[in-house]
Image: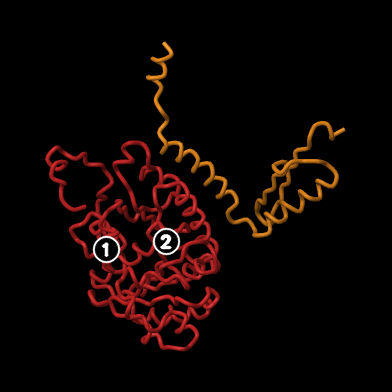
Amino acid sequence: MAKIIVVTSGKGGVGKTTSAAAIATGLALRGKKTVVIDFDVGLRNLDLIMGCERRVVYDLVNVIQGEAGLNQALIRDKRVENLFILPASQTRDKDALTQEGVEEVLDTLKETFDYILCDSPAGIERGAQLAMYYADEAIVVTNPEVSSVRDSDRILGLLSSKTRRAVQGDDPIKEHLLVTRYNPERVTQGDMLTLDDIREILAINLLGLIPESDAVLRASNQGVPVTHDADSDAGQAYTDTVSRLLGEDVPLRFHEWQKKGLLSRMFGGGRR
Amino acid sequence: MKLLEFLKRERKKSASVAKERLQIIVAHQRSQRGQPDYMPMLERELLEVIRRYVHVGDDAIQISLDSEDNCSVLELNVTLPKSERD
């Protein structure tokens, strides 16, 4: 049975698309047939992060409006088998998505895929609500910063009231917390919310913690999801996150600050 | 002496300020969760009606909707200024 997972946050720029791309890649690397859908109509970026921007011909809106078949719009990932991308439209306005259209696309995808990831646009408007409406699970991406945490709480409110599961009174959406851009050094200095602070305030299950990392920008520059950078801290943290999503019990890493020794300070101490 | 106190006083870490502020705002957000969409509008209009008779500030009115077994109770609290009560 296919699982629909929305990657959402409320606030923009916290790492939704980076996380959607990295987690989709991780799931496919684990042999799960996965599709990741960009719901950010008008401002698509998932194609860039996935490195397939030059292969976009048709998009989600074309499919919903009947101008192209689903198979024409799906882009097969060049690096990983079992991974597909459904891009958002660049030109049309947000009203081009209809609820019935989205449902039809998801129902069709459910027949062939194990995991359907919906990359939500920022905000709490129509686009974000459509991205979450049919979800079974939600990954709430949060930065250790006041506005991000507050917006995540707003999103949790929407997840428990404005989704199909909430409206129909089914089992509630399973909510996961993904903390990104975490800087253990600043936490130690007392200038960044700790992981425990965020967990206490939002009170949902922790799926993963991604440290602030140079590897993320490097990955987006190249259009290669950071999961492929297996030597990097962020890459490993996303791999751990995917394992937990699959129900495995993986210990948390990268949440404590390792003070640099003299030698590593002198010689740079390897890749981050 | 003053200098010693100054040195001993520890600056409050910004992260703990952030946490306190968040706890308050999130509690407030959650108290509004699940209430009908018309509540903010209802609150504004009630305030307008009251203002036709008494001059009250924006924060003089508190409104909440609680559900009990088979009915909902709309609770309205208006704080009137002292001079205008008699």
Looking at the rendered image, the disc whose residue lies closer to the viewer, 2 or 1, is 1
**Residue A37 as seen in the image, left or right of residue A165:** left
At 49% from the left edge and 43% from the top edge, which residue is drawn? B22
Q: Chain of mark 1?
A: A
Of the pair A174 and B42, the residue shown nearer to us? B42
Q: Is residue A264 above or below residue A46?
A: above
Query: Given the image, on which type of amino acid does mark 1 rest?
Result: Ala
* Palette colour of chain A: red
Residue hosting label 2? A174
Helix, strand or loop status at disc 2:
strand
Neighbour tally class for label 1: few under 14, some 14-19, many 20 plus, Cα within 10 Å:
many
Look at the image and give the colour of chain B: orange
Locate residue A190, reporting x and y percent. 36, 36
Please give the label number shown on residue A219: 1
Mark 2 burial class by Cα count in 10 Å: few <14, some 14-19, many 20+ = some
- Mark earlier in primary sequence (2, 1): 2
The three-letter amino acid code for the residue at tag 2 is Lys
Q: Quadrant of the C terminus of chain B?
A: top right
Residue at horizontal 32 percent and vertical 55 percent from the top: A208
Vertical comparison of A81 with A221: above or below = below
Spatial CA span between label 2 and label 1: 29 Å
Q: Name the residue: 53% across, 75% down.
A: A93
- Rendered image quadrant of residue A197: top left
